Image (cartoon, rainbow, N blue to C red):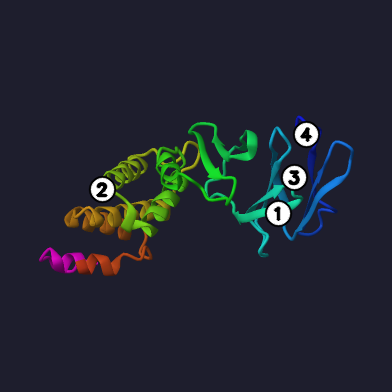
Amino acid sequence: RVANNGTFILNDWGSGRSLSGTFYAFDSTGTMLVKHHFRANLYRNALAEDGALALCETANSPTKDGAVLACFDLLDRRVRWVVPRPSFLPDAYEIAPSSSSISLRYSDLGAFHMSAGSGEILEPREIELAFLTSTNGFTVMAVVEALLAEAATVTEAEWQATLVALNRLLQGSFHPSMTPTPRDLAKAHKLSGHVLEILGHGADALRAYQAALALDNRAGVARRISALSRELGLSGTV
């Protein structure tokens, strides 16, 4: 990639026989600005049009360098920050002029933003909710799990949207090219049960957990079935 001022960057994958790679940046005269070695294979990079800032993303690796996004200040010739790469990988990264922000661009969802100063994603909840509309059921379930981990900050309207997305999966729109296994469907029912419980719909949650157990006897819902059965005055049916 080449900036308007002639600065350019490249990923050197080395021999390809090990999990490693080196990111380089040079100015228009060929003077090296940055050389940074990662103990992970390199994935994508991005460069600001003015050549002030660059990004390098790594692939999965068992080392601390795996699945990270690194930002390089090419004017100061230093690493500005290294953070875990976004959970939902964008189709492209774009660095705004003057390096004020970084755009995460998704082909079907538009752009979201992260701070160029810290690498913090500025609209994490908005990204999660946008991905609830995904046609990939596995992506939807990953979003629901993320929301459950942040349950204290999720609004009722957001839970309702989550439930709509899960119901869509269970009504046959799980994946455009893959047939879900019984275990996949059991997980979707289980997640529905969790959301229904949060919304105060105990009887519906119980039915969701029972549906999960019917599909997968290792779904991990037996305790919730017993607890809800007691709360609803029913005999424990596991």
Asked whether disc 2 touches disc 1, contact meaning CB atoms under 8 Å apart, the reply is no
User: Could you tell me which secondary element the residue under label 4 belongs to?
Assistant: loop
Query: Residue 211 at what x, y percent from top left?
Result: 28, 55
Mark 4–mark 3 distance (CA, rounded to whole Å)? 15 Å
Residue type beneath disc 2 = Glu
Is residue 128 depicted above or below 225 in this figure? Answer: above
- In the depicted structure, whether residue 168 falls above or below residue 199: above
> Which residue carries the number 3 mark?
75
Which badge, 4 or 3, is on the more N-terminal residue?
4
> What residue type is disc 4 on?
Val
Q: Is residue 8 visible?
A: yes
Spatial CA span between label 2 and label 1? 41 Å
226 vs 119, left or right, is left
In this image, 62 relative to 177: left or right? right
Magenta stretch: residue 201 in it? no
Residue at 35%, 42% (x, y): give it: 165
Mark nearer the viewer, 2 or 4: 4
In-front residue for pair 77/131: 77
Q: Nearer the viewer, mark 1 or mark 3?
A: 3
